[in-house]
Image: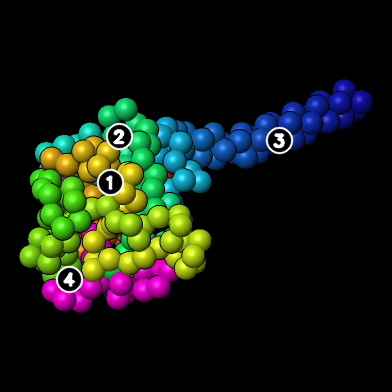
Amino acid sequence: MNKLLLISLWAIATSTMTGDLNNTQQVKAPIEIKQTEQELVKDPVKELYDEMKLQGTIKWEAFEQAMQGYNQLSPKNRNIMTIIDFTLPSTDKRMYVLDMKAKRLLYHSVVSHGRNSGENYATSFSNRNGSFQSSLGFYYASETYFGGNGYSLRLDGLEKGINDQARPRAIVVHGADYCSTDIIKSTGRLGRSYGCPALPRELAKPIINTIKGGSLMFIYAGNKEYLANTKFVKKSPLMPSNTLIATQEAEETIKGKTVLN
């Protein structure tokens, strides 16, 4: 009897330990799967943003949307990209000139918006001639010339109905006396243009010489109307194909593990 009792107790204990081990494996497996999934699903745009150390300098949403256009368009000069963030006030440095090849920020400057787009903040936008408002979206920074505002750079709007009247409207990059820290101190904001992204006099020439020749410019404002009409930016951007494949593989792996367990 004692021997039979000992054998029975041993069998029960062994069964319990096996069950505990199985339960432990079932708990750990999803954690391992999640780690694998995170490793597979990588966002190359976010990796570039981190590599360029832009957090705290350029808003992620502005950079991510700019990159959507950058990856679809074919600018002559892909080494340079300019972002203007009109969600920021004119008193802030809201123009960013990026070296995409060297992966670094070249210039960070204040920039004016159109006189009818708003006071310190640009909130209204137009593609219409005579509106004296800024236009959002993607542009090519084209050729230079000397005009009434000195050394200037013509912009070609790439979005029909949004900014394609930039050249007829003479929307250009140029230097302006009203774009300075002295004006900010005296009025509480920058002076405003007729719709041009105007720069401080001392920065106009070096910035123009850097971005001229067909580089891409993106003017961002987090504007719902723009997002509803642009063909280059999606509200919820699609994953790159390699990321999508990785996600599918991860899901299949998870399903497989679930079935096995």
- Residue beneath disc 4: 127
Say the numbered circle drawn on residue 204: 1
Q: Which of the two marks, 4 or 3, is nearer to us in this view? A: 4
Residues under numbered marks 4 and 3 in contact, where contact means CB atoms less than 8 Å apart: no
Cα separation, mark 1 vs mark 4, equals 24 Å
Cα separation, mark 2 vs mark 4, equals 29 Å
Q: Within 10 angstroms of label 2, few (less than 14), some, or many (20 or more) residues?
A: some
Does the magenta portion include 126?
yes
Percent of width and height locating residue 36: 47, 33
Cα separation, mark 4 vs mark 3, equals 68 Å
- Residue beneath disc 2: 99
Q: Residue at x 36, y 74 (%)?
A: 118
**Is 148 drawn above or below residue 146 in the view shown?**
below
Count of picture labels: 4
| 183 left or right of 193 in image | right
Q: Secondary structure at mark 3?
A: helix
Residues under numbered marks 1 and 2 in contact, where contact means CB atoms less than 8 Å apart: no
Q: Which of the two marks, 1 or 4, is nearer to us in this view? A: 1
Region in magenta:
115-142
In the picture, the quarter occupied by the N terminus is top right
Does the magenta portion include 18?
no
| 38 left or right of 112 in image | right
Say which label, 4 or 3, has the lower sequence index.
3
**Is 190 drawn above or below residue 253 in the view shown?**
below
Q: Secondary structure at mark 4?
A: loop
Q: Within 10 angstroms of label 4, few (less than 14), some, or many (20 or more) residues?
A: many
Percent of width and height locating residue 203: 32, 44
Residues under numbered marks 2 and 4 in contact, where contact means CB atoms less than 8 Å apart: no
